[in-house]
Amino acid sequence: MKKILLRSFEVLILLIWIFPLAWLVITSIQLESDVISSTLRLWPRNPTLENYRKAFGSTQIMHWMANSMTISFSTMILTLVVDAPIAYAFAKIKFRGKEILFWAVMAGMMVPFQVLIIPLYQQFNAFGLVDTLAGAMLPRLAMPVGIFILKQFFEGIPSALEEAAFIDGANRYRIFATIIVPLGKAAMATVIILSFINAWNDFLWPLIVINDTARYTITVGIANFQGTHGTDYALIMSGALIASIPQFIFYAFFRKKIIAGIAMSGIKG
């Protein structure tokens, strides 16, 4: 009986999770007249790909996808370049005030991004980075949760490896590049996927910092379907589904690495 109840609960959770995705797909292949109809249908009366033809033919969705790809992959790589050395310093190097500085970095996770928007915009405007892809990317580079994941993993690497490298004449830079980085691939894969998804889904900051339609990210572009084409829910759903495909592919490719990285970083829950 316990197993039956457990499996029933798991199936219920699965259905709750899948329902919005299924509704997204179903709505994207319906005519707008059927979407706004008062009759609820679990399957469209007249399935059509017209919304996808409209999305690809009358909007700049592929250009917006390319912008999001550029921002997301750049953020993914640069976040790792920034976070990994910081995490290594917190994990393996002794210096005065390390604990205070680490918890100050961790406190950054509790600061809502909305609080920083006005000073960030003023700084980016002064540097001439407003309405650029670089301006949309830079605020997301230093990711506190990425530093935490990497630090937890690096702390589990035996110090004897470093000591042996020091005896052989290696310096900190060589130890980091030849020992820490190769052993930390699982945790780094986790940071990579989290930074990619974080950058891909970012909406508020690109909406504020980018004005040119040609530089829109996919999230901002889809949101503007409502202003450009009226409230065409079927078109918005088709655009949202198109925008979700790269994330599903990316997650499917790195799924095992993400689970392994989180497990070995000591994160529970």
Image: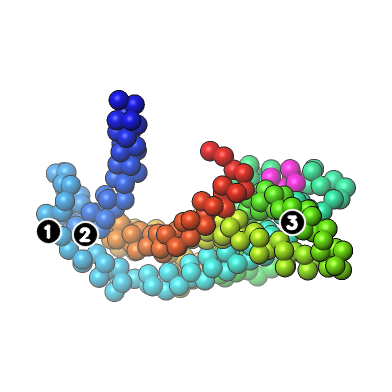
Residue 90's label in the rendered image is none
Q: What amino acid is found at the position of numbered circle 2 in the picture?
A: Ile
Does the residue at mark 3 contact the one at mark 2 (Cβ under 8 Å)? Answer: no
Q: Main secondary structure of the magenta part?
A: helix
Q: Residue at x 77, y 58 (%)?
A: 161
* Element carrying mark 3: helix
* Residue labelled with disc 3: 88
- Which tag is nearer the camera, tag 1 or tag 3? 3
In the image, 172 versus 86, the foreground residue is 172
Residue 103 covered by magenta stretch: yes
Image-based side of 77 in relation to 50, left or right:
right
Q: Is residue 158 left or right of residue 247?
A: right
The reply to whether callout 1 and callout 3 are in contact (CB within 8 Å) is: no
Q: Which residue is mark 1?
A: 46
First to last magenta residue range = 102-106
**Circle 2 crowding by C-alpha within 10 Å: few under 14, some 14–19, many from 20:** many
Q: Quadrant of the N terminus?
A: top left
Q: Amino acid at mark 1?
A: Asn
Q: CA distance from mark 1 to mark 3?
A: 57 Å
